[in-house]
């Protein structure tokens, strides 16, 4: 079998690269940065396959340049960075990496919840700065977690995994989605509620929805006004599901108590004023950033490419 010529838009964990190089001729972007549209267009020409990242804008122009490519394997579960309809018209398959990052993302959502509720980042900075002079009854008072109401917006794989981890904290779990998840309800005792109820009753509201036209600015000014002033918002899904300008206003004016964010509306740029706020924990899109998970993601993306090379359907074919 003739080896395929594959372009990888950014360096990945070595086991994935080694597997790809065993079967294909491989070129990898040597720089740790996102390629420009012009650079992508130049690099995808003449390739049999492209392994791309969620930070790559795979538009119709890029797909046209990749004439002859059979597959773009996205190193992510989401694929809103790819014009899937344009790819379909051009006969190019698109794959993703679902499932493998479910538990890791749910873990990070909990890390953000705890860090925000207990003011971990501010307390760490305070201590490192040499300001700690001894125990004080009013020092860094946060929010209790055990026994509170946990709202999960989106009851899919990651939302359900996140909810299952709440059982140890004796939380009341409520959730909202377009489709009910009966298995999740049975496993956790979660109660399905409408959109207004989850906003009004949640002490902690964690977002686990895909970025679609319908979910852009899912949480904005009106929603913040419905939430408790003691509530905490967590987002590990996609940045634009929150109106970030409205979030800054809500945090500044204490409409909600705090927020923990892994993703941002204009990544890597942040909304003006966000970094100055002490009641928000912000991390740089690291929900899947464990050694094990990022390696599994890479291997899965490579296996999608190798399946197509063998004339098979990729295991994780996107079928929008």
Image (cartoon, grey):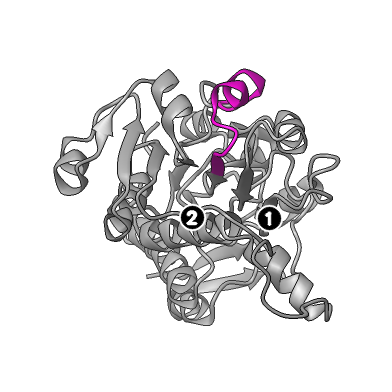
Camera sees residue 173: yes
CA neighbours of label 2 inside 10 A, class few (<14), some (14 to 19), many (20+): many
Residue ID for mark 1: 282
> Mark 2 or mark 1, which has the lower sequence index?
2
Q: Tell me the element at label 1.
A: strand
Residue 104 screen position, x and y as percent: 42, 63
Locate residue 144, reporting x and y percent: 47, 54
Q: The magenta stretch spans which residues?
A: 217-233
The residue that mark 2 highlights is: 109
* Residue at x 44%, y 69% (from the top left corner): 293
Q: Is residue 152 magenta?
A: no
For the residue pair 212 and 1, the one nearer the viewer reads as 212
User: Tag 2, which secondary structure?
Assistant: helix
Is 223 colored magenta in this rendering? yes
Residue 264 occupies quadrant: top right
User: Distance between the Cα atoms at labels 2 and 1?
Assistant: 12 Å
- Between 190 and 288, the residue placed more toward the observer is 190
The x and y percentages for residue 60 are 64, 33
């Amino acid at each position: 079998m003739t080896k395929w010529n594959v372009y990888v838009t950014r360096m990945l964990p070595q086991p994935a690269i080694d597997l790809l190089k065993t079967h294909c001729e491989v070129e990898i972007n040597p720089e740790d940065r996102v390629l420009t549209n012009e650079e992508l267009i130049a690099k995808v020409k003449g390739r049999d396959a492209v392994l791309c990242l969620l930070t790559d804008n795979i538009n119709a122009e890029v797909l046209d340049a990749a004439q002859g490519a059979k597959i773009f394997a996205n190193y992510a579960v989401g694929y809103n960075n790819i014009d899937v309809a344009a790819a379909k018209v051009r006969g190019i398959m698109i794959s993703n990496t679902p499932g493998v990052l479910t538990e890791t993302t749910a873990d990070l959502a909990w890390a953000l919840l705890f860090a925000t509720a207990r003011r971990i980042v501010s307390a760490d900075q305070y201590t490192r700065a040499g300001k700690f002079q001894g125990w004080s009854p009013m020092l860094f008072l946060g929010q209790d977690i055990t026994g509170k109401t946990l709202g999960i917006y989106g009851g899919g794989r990651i939302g359900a995994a996140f909810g299952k981890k709440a059982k140890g904290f004796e939380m009341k779990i409520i959730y909202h989605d377009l489709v009910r998840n009966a298995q999740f309800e049975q496993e956790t005792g979660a109660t399905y509620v409408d959109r207004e109820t989850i906003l009004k009753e949640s002490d902690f509201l964690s977002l686990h929805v895909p970025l679609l036209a319908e979910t852009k600015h899912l949480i904005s000014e009106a929603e913040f006004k419905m939430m408790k002033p003691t509530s905490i918002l967590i987002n590990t899904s996609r940045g634009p599901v929150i109106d970030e300008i409205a979030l800054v206003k809500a945090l500044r004016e204490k409409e909600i108590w705090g927020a923990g964010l892994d993703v941002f509306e204009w990544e890597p740029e942040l909304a003006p004023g966000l970094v100055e706020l002490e009641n928000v924990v912000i991390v740089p899109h690291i929900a899947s950033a464990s050694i094990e998970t990022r390696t599994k993601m890479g291997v899965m993306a490579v296996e999608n490419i190798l399946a197509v090379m063998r004339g098979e359907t990729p295991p994780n074919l996107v079928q929008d």
